[in-house]
Amino acid sequence: GAVVSQHPSWVICKSGTSVKIECRSLDFQATTMFWYRQFPKQSLMLMATSNEGSKATYEQGVEKDKFLINHASLTLSTLTVTSAHPEDSSFYICSAPEGWREDYTDTQYFGPGTRLTVL
Amino acid sequence: AQTVTQSQPEMSVQEAETVTLSCTYDTSESDYYLFWYKQPPSRQMILVIRQEAYKQQNATENRFSVNFQKAAKSFSLKISDSQLGDAAMYFCAYRGSIYNQGGKLIFGQGTELSVKP
């Protein structure tokens, strides 16, 4: 199956700094990517939909100025957590559908996630 | 808005036995897809099984099968011959029309499955 990578897998930063997380589709093109946030023992909460060549679509309650998303190419989306604070500490996961087929089926592939710890 | 509910936070099964995880959802759409994902301790999300709403036949993948009741909006996962490697968090997920919802997945709260040797 297709592979989605994330980098870094783990990052620790000081409060007030910005952190960039990369999501790459390694062997397929993804015009759309999704960013999720997951707290321990909880479900995945969709933060935003990243669209290549256009602005990201944010879910209600997600601060777009704090979580900047850039879909730079058909294989790369980045999430930048600006002015990070301890409450931003979480596990961030991206996913990308391999492609919409004629029958609208698709397989979404998930990255391995990035653990962010803000001190 | 669509919602997905998993009412069993934790489940336990004896190795080689069968276990069923429950999932209900709410939607006004007629065309949609339902998924079960597994998240082991590594936290890598793994697709277990997928069901297209327009298909009446229940999906199966080896030891995994679903009981899809469209009218009741129920989508349960049955794991047969449970193995130690099945221990993980299981998430039920809904995906609506790519035109209306953009293809995003809506997840349930998750069920943590433990397998006893």
Image (cartoon, coloured by chain):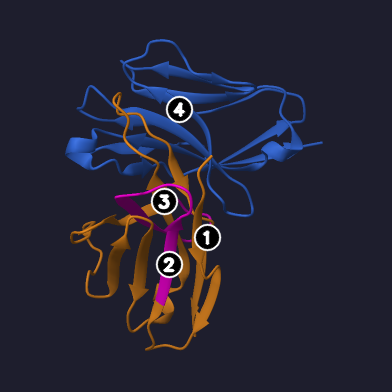
Residue count near mark 4 (Cα–Cα under 10 Å), binned few <14, some 14–19, many ≥20: many
Q: What residue would you read off at disc 4?
A: B50
- Left or right of A92 in this view: B80: right
Task: Report in which chain the residue with disc 1 lies.
Answer: A
User: Tag on residue A22?
Assistant: 2
Q: What residue would you read off at disc 1?
A: A40
Amino acid type, mark 2:
Glu
| Residue ID at (21%, 27%) | B29
Say which quadrant the N terminus of chain B sits in: top left
The residues colored magenta run A20-44
Q: What residue would you read off at disc 3?
A: A95
**Marks 1, 3: nearer the viewer:** 3
Q: Secondary structure at mark 1?
A: loop
- Left or right of B106 in this view: B88: right
Residue in the foreground of this view, choosing between B66 and A106: A106
Seen in the picture, residue B80 relative to A26 is either above or below; the reply is: above
Question: Are the residues flagged by discs 2 and 1 in contact, CB closer than 8 Å?
Answer: no
Say which quadrant the C terminus of chain B sits in: top right
Do discs 2 and 4 share a chain? no
Q: Is residue A23 magenta?
A: yes
Seen in the picture, residue A67 relative to A101 is either above or below; the reply is: below
Q: Colour of chain A?
A: orange
Q: Secondary structure at mark 2?
A: strand
- Position in image of residue B110 (x %, y %): 49, 43
First in sequence: mark 1 vs mark 3: 1
Residue in the foreground of this view, choosing between A52 and B95: A52
